[in-house]
Image (cartoon, coloured by chain):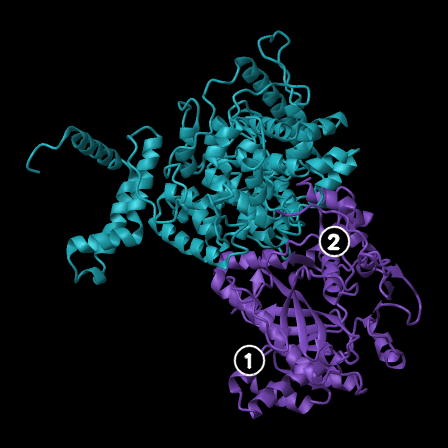
Chain colours: A cyan, B purple
């Protein structure tokens, strides 16, 4: 450079230096470099100019995208300033209102939660946790299976017929039977619902305004995002945007277009771009790849999964048994029964890999960090979600059996008490992957980012309490008469919607629709779509609800979800429903 | 946007005319009856005084030739449907069609008739089979009785002595079997073998007019469900095949599980991509048309007749479809609520296509695939709509028999 660069550029240069020096401290950076070098020494690049070869290697391997993902990640951890965005391929962003990768403004400002509410919720949480521990101990006695014990049968044995059966093989026949018919579980949705609606504020609390009469929640949840915010956040769901899951069935060319674009985006491997792409839905043939690109951007080395395996095979936990029993019941679902074997494999991998306080598992942020602490990936990635981030980091080496306490308060190791239906959350994943080493990190990430929030009692923004409150608010705002009519029948509308929310619609909607919903959930990085869809569905049936006279009527109204279109419901509710904002 | 399930008014009412009541007769007491009643039709047990008769095959064979029907009357079988639906005759017709095409030097088309495994009729073709057996060492064969259905009397063979023993024990030549090369490389999902059940409605053989139903299912053979069926009690609130099969009057512990075709196709697409899977489904449609063309000349066309066929198709691990069997009376008794929905919708659409009332414009989930010549669909991603989303609203909840509803609630309202 002849002259000194102008200040702005200088600033940029120093920022880039800054970024590079930070990058050089990360292992991923060096492994990306190593793989570029490996590629470069291949014979096919010997003939051409070095710079040209480098360019080719970079573009074909998607390395710029990977590096950007890395910088993005470091940026999120506050280690570097954010980079300017890279250009999206043509026709990716039809509505340029939101820049690619812009943070989704859907979190209410921190500190909006009342301290009294925090106290009340944490009290309810520890009460519920104590109950779970008690139930676990009861089950342990009843099934004559200690909370954990070394495996009796050699690992990896395969009994004919059923994989879940193999897990249960060491139980006494009667215990096995009761697990298999699904009658034994620590808790189910009703218990959690009950715990949620019985949160009680201390009598001295006067500063909180009471919740409206129609709400079944005992506390008023403040700071929920409103419709106006949703309309900008979920702009890509606007009816003017063509959608996978709606327009592709009528317009073959659109599906083909999306597929071509998808392959292009996948090649670039830049997470914000892939997210942007997924906002309008992902064709089935590349869904697995797209989800993995977003959720597991630095594709986990496959040996990691293999390392985790022996741990689960060396000892067996009562929770394994409960989970296997749960998979049994999923395996009886018309939509998922074919996946029984992969599902057992997946579920038993995801959950038992950690050591953790039971009480902390109900806090998705803190509990999550430890939830999968055997797994170095989770430990590193979930840590940033912790508030405050100063909790002691979990041990990175596997804990020896002798060190592991087997008493109740630190059980199960993952901190996730398998409730009835937990394995349904893993079932749709089986539609996407046949290789468990690919499926496992995706499910782990989905669980860590989203699903753990669906069954925790927490006052943190975006968790179950918020989601339920949002459903009530939206459903009431969209059609007050229908909502209040159902309330007047003595049926809390939230009780109807609770299962939809708690299971992110698995088990209710057919899998193709669940996957279309989860496309958006992952793309927009937001669980809000779950209560929004619940409210949309509620409102869609509002006129029928007005005529209902009993709980049976209401069950009938929602009994048949087979013809519902998730995308159409969301579009109509978000953009075509008149609502006071 | 999916529409709400609303009760349809009784059909057949034309403006200004008094509504014509359709009278039906049905030998079946299952979904067929529910659908016909739901359309506002009136049941009758009159011998011939009806507009539509859902008859058993025996009636067609014994009575059809002795009654005189008027123009609007319809019966659900063709006179000699067995040309297509009896295992040995189907194979004979397919082989003949193939030879004929070869004679006409249409080698390419003839080569497409390769969707049935090598098959011989025993005891008549024992000699031919023996030659084939000697040439193909190590091949497993499957013996199926011609007259029986639903997997009865089937056994596997890999030694010549097994067949000679069988011959000795079955001296009656009318008790014939077919012996067929066993397809030992089936496509597996979750480690399980399955076959597809696909429905095709033929309303005429001259010109050949065939409608293919978009929905169907894969039937997975599961035996583990029999182990615990005894205790699958009321605590089981999931929508489970077991629970419902058990309460269904015709519970068959070997019936296995059904996975709907749309989801099966979606799963295969996510595994193999659009291209190969769309090709597979297009090949299935082509296979069905070819099987119908093979019998078109021999089946006696009759304007009173229509027939709903259930095709059993196996996919191998190279994504090639194989025709196992065609059923003239596919089971219309539902074993689950989902199954009931499918069959209710299927039959509703059958009657819409037949247009007994003379006022229909809809044909629901059926797509016309052949009328004298293949029917081309508007350009979509794939060459067939088989396995595509089938969103047409049909069965309103109130017609769901209570026995399904108890389970339907538990299963459909989320995990228990």
Q: Chain of mark 2?
A: B
Q: Nearer the viewer, mark 1 or mark 2?
A: 1
* Towards the viewer: B246 or A113: A113
The residue indicated by pointer 1 is B112
Q: Can see residue B155?
A: yes
Report the residue at 59% width, 16% height from top.
A120
**The C terminus of chain A - image quarter:** top right
In the image, residue A284 above or below residue B290:
above
Please report whichever mark, 1 or 2, sits nearer to the chain's N-terminal start. 1
* In this picture, residue B181 sits left or right of residue A255: right
Q: Chain of mark 1?
A: B
Q: Position of residue B22 (x, y in %)?
A: 85, 62
* Towards the viewer: A389 or B338: B338
* Towards the viewer: B267 or A102: A102
Q: Can see residue B182?
A: no
Label 1, secondary structure: give it: loop
Q: Are marks 1 and 2 on the same chain?
A: yes
Q: Residue furthest right?
A: B46
In the image, residue B65 above or below residue B39:
below
**The N terminus of chain A - image quarter:** top left
Report the residue at 60% width, 89% height from top.
B99
* In this picture, residue B395 sits left or right of residue A414: right
Cα–Cα gap, marks 1 and 2: 37 Å
Disc assigned to residue B336: 2
Q: Position of residue A574 (x, y in %)?
A: 54, 36
Label 2, secondary structure: give it: loop
Q: Position of residue B316 (x, y in %)?
A: 56, 69
């Amino acid at each position: 450079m002849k002259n000194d660069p102008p200040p702005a550029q200088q600033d940029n240069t120093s920022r880039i230096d800054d970024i590079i020096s930070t990058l050089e401290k990360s292992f991923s950076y060096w492994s990306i470099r190593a793989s570029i070098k490996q590629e470069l020494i291949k014979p096919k690049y010997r003939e051409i100019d070095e710079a040209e070869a480098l360019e080719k290697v970079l573009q074909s391997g998607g390395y710029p995208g990977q590096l950007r993902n890395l910088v993005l990640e470091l940026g999120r951890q506050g280690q570097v300033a954010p980079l300017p965005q890279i250009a999206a391929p043509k026709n990716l962003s039809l509505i340029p209102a939101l820049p690619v990768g812009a943070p989704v403004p859907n979190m209410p400002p921190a500190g909006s939660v009342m301290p009294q509410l925090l106290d009340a919720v944490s009290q309810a949480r520890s009460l519920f946790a104590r109950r779970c521990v008690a139930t676990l101990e009861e089950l342990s006695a009843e099934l004559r299976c200690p909370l954990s014990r070394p495996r009796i049968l050699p690992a990896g044995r395969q009994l004919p017929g059923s994989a879940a059966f193999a897990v249960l093989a060491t139980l006494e026949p009667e215990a096995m039977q009761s697990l298999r018919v699904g009658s034994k579980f620590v808790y189910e949705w009703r218990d959690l619902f009950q715990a949620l609606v019985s949160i009680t504020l201390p009598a001295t609390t006067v500063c909180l305004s009471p919740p409206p009469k129609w709400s079944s929640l005992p506390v008023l949840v403040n700071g929920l995002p409103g419709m106006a915010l949703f309309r900008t956040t979920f702009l890509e769901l606007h009816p003017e945007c063509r959608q996978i899951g709606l327009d592709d069935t009528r317009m073959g060319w659109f599906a083909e277009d999306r597929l071509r674009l998808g392959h292009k985006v996948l090649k670039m491997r830049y997470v914000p771009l892939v997210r942007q792409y997924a906002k309008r839905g992902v064709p089935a043939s590349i869904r697995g790849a797209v989800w993995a690109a977003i959720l597991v951007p630095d594709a986990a080395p496959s040996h990691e999964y293999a390392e985790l395996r022996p741990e689960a095979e060396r000892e067996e936990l009562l929770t394994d048994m409960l989970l296997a029993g749960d998979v049994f019941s999923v395996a009886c679902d018309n939509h998922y029964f074919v996946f029984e074997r992969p599902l057992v494999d997946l579920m038993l991998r995801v959950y038992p890999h950690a050591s953790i306080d039971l009480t902390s598992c109900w806090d998705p942020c803190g509990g999550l960090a430890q939830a999968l602490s055997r797994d170095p990936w989770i430990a590193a990635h979930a840590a940033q979600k912790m508030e405050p981030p100063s909790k002691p980091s979990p041990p990175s080496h596997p804990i020896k059996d002798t060190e592991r306490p087997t008493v109740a308060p630190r059980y199960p190791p993952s901190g996730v008490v398998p409730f009835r239906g937990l394995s349904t959350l893993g079932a749709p994943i089986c539609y996407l992957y046949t290789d468990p080493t690919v499926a496992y990190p995706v499910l782990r990430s989905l669980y860590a980012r989203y699903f753990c929030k669906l069954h925790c009692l927490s006052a943190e923004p975006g968790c179950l309490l918020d989601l339920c409150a949002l459903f009530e608010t939206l459903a009431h705002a969209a059609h007050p008469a229908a909502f209040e009519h159902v309330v007047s029948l003595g049926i809390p509308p939230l009780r109807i919607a609770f299962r939809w929310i708690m299971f992110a619609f698995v088990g209710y909607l057919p899998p193709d629709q669940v996957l279309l919903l989860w496309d958006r959930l992952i793309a927009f990085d937001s669980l809000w779509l779950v209560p929004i869809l619940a409210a949309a569905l509620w409102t869609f049936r509002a006129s029928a609800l007005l005529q209902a006279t009993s709980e049976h009527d209401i069950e009938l109204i929602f009994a048949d979800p087979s013809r519902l279109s998730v995308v159409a419901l969301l579009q109509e509710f978000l953009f075509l429903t008149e609502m006071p904002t | 946007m999916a529409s709400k399930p609303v009760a349809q008014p009784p059909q057949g009412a034309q403006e200004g005319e008094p509504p014509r009541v359709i009278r039906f007769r049905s030998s079946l007491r299952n979904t067929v009856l529910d659908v016909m009643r739901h359309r506002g039709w009136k049941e009758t047990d009159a011998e011939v005084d009806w507009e539509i008769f859902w008859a058993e095959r025996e009636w067609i064979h014994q009575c059809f030739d002795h009654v005189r029907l008027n123009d609007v009357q319809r019966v659900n079988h063709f006179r000699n449907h067995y040309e297509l639906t009896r295992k040995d005759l189907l194979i004979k017709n397919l082989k003949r069609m193939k030879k004929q095409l070869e004679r006409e030097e249409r080698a390419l088309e003839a080569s497409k008739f390769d969707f049935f495994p090598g098959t011989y009729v025993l005891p008549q073709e024992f000699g031919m089979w023996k030659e084939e057996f000697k040439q193909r060492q190590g091949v497993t064969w499957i013996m199926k009785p011609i007259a029986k259905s639903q997997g009865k009397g089937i056994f596997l063979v890999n030694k010549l002595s097994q067949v000679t023993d069988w011959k000795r024990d079955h001296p009656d030549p009318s008790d014939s079997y077919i012996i067929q090369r066993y397809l030992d490389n089936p496509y597996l999902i979750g480690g399980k073998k399955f076959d597809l059940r696909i429905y095709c409605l033929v309303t005429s053989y001259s010109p050949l007019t065939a409608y293919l139903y978009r929905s169907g299912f894969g039937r997975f053979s599961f035996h583990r469900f029999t182990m615990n069926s005894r205790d699958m009690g009321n605590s089981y609130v999931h929508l489970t095949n077991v629970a419902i099969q058990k309460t269904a009057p015709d519970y068959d512990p070997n019936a296995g599980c059904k996975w709907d075709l749309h989801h099966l196709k979606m799963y295969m697409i996510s595994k193999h991509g659009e291209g190969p899977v769309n090709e597979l489904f297009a090949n299935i449609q082509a296979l069905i048309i070819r099987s119908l063309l093979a019998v078109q000349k021999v089946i006696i066309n009759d304007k009173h007749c229509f027939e709903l066929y259930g095709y059993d198709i196996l996919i191998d691990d190279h994504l090639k479809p194989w025709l196992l069997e065609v059923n003239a009376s596919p089971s219309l008794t539902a074993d689950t609520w989902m199954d009931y929905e499918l069959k209710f919708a299927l039959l509703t659409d059958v009657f819409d296509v037949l247009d007994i009332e003379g006022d229909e414009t809809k044909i629901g989930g059926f797509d016309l695939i052949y009328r004298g010549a293949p029917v081309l669909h508007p350009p979509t991603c794939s060459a067939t709509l088989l396995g595509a989303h089938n969103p047409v609203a049909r069965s309103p909840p109130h017609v769901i028999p209570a026995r399904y509803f108890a389970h339907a609630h538990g299963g459909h309202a989320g995990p228990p």
